[in-house]
Image: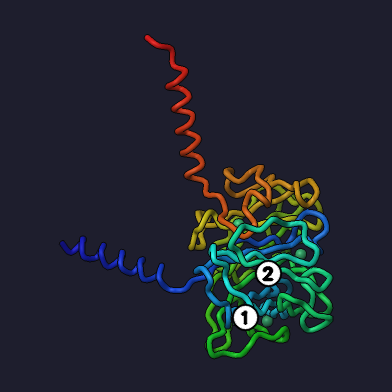
Amino acid sequence: MKRILSSLAVLSLAVSATNAQSVWINEVLANPLGADGGNEYFELRGTPNMSLAGYYLLSLEGQGGTGRGDINQFFDLGAFSIGANGYLFARQYNSPHGPVAPGATLMENTIEPGWGQANGAGSSVGHYSDGTQTDLENSATTIMLVNIGTGPVPLTTMDLDTDNDGFLDLPEGWTVVDSIGLIDGNNPQASDYSYGAITFRAPNNNGEYFGGSAYGNVIDLPGSPPTTAGALYVGRKGESTGSTADDWFGAIMRSGNILNQKFDVTTDPFYEGLQYKDMVYGGPNPIPEPGTWALLGLGGLAYLLRRPKR
Ligand SMILES: [Ca+2]
Ligand SMILES: [Ca+2]
Ligand SMILES: [Ca+2]
Ligand SMILES: [Ca+2]
């Protein structure tokens, strides 16, 4: 009886979590193979039509000692909402990535180049950055979705790891909603740091892995980067909500133009050979299990049909 009651308690907790407004980082292409400008994108997933007022997507510095934890760039998401289908797809100026799934919010920068710069010549997607940067920092970086609550708005002069110990020192009122660390194989160093709930790490050209996270949960990508500039994609598996290797996969692209680049090396073989469009721009990412079972089911059916009659 006690077990049934506690199961019911777990179930009701799960139901209330589902009812609460929630949002996740769902895909990040910070470092496509070849030119980044125009070709980067990210996807958020959440409660349909939910306002993103108070939400910011940050990129934190993960290189060096003293700069560690600085906010390199961020998006003020306050003007946007999750789409009616539960997705938001963000792309750069003059992006080749589309079409976007019906019902998704399209967050598209219309002021060239790249993501633009709200603290410079302008950005229609609320992108603020250091210097004149209009593309996403590749590595080592942490892409972090925060809700600032009653706390201060982010600034590119903020340092979220003031003592550089690898642990976040967040302003009062802020909540980390979701986060992912990227160490992409472009000259990684032992001092590279991630603050992500999960981190994907590619080796350098000699197959050596460097850098890490005080938060642990570092997943190594097999295979070396195609060039010294690296290439790295990360995405959630289906509509996952956690931060484990069962929830996320990483991929390295090794050849092709932007629209026919494939996931050549992955942390989950299911995704090998897939392309960006297969992840659905502004729609659900494929899930390994159902596809595999459907194939097995079809295979079994074919076997039954072709089985010689006795
Ligand atoms: Ca710092
Ligand atoms: Ca980039
Ligand atoms: Ca710290
Ligand atoms: Ca998707």
The reply to whether residue 211 is visible in this rendering is no
Residue 31 occupies quadrant = bottom right
In the picture, measured across the screen, residue 107 lies left or right of residue 293, that is: right
Quarter containing the N terminus: bottom left
* Residue at image coords 60%, 59%: 102
Q: Position of residue 150 (x, y in %)?
A: 54, 90
What is the count of numbered marks? 2
The residue to which callout 1 is attached is 78
Q: Nearer the viewer, residue 266 or 20?
A: 20
Quarter holding ligand 1 = bottom right
Q: Position of residue 274 (x, y in %)?
A: 65, 45
The residue to which callout 2 is attached is 107
SS type, badge 1: loop
Q: Nearer the viewer, residue 26 or 80?
A: 80
Q: What amino acid type is highlighted by mark number 2?
A: Met
253 w.r.t. 163: above or below: above
68 w.r.t. 95: above or below: below
Residue 283 occupies quadrant = bottom right
Separation of residues labelled 1 and 2 (CA atoms): 12 Å
Q: What amino acid type is highlighted by mark number 1?
A: Gly
Coloring scheme used:
rainbow
Does label 2 point to a residue whose CB lies under 8 Å from ligand 4? Answer: no
Few, some or many residues within 10 Å of mark 1 (<14, 14–19, 20+): some
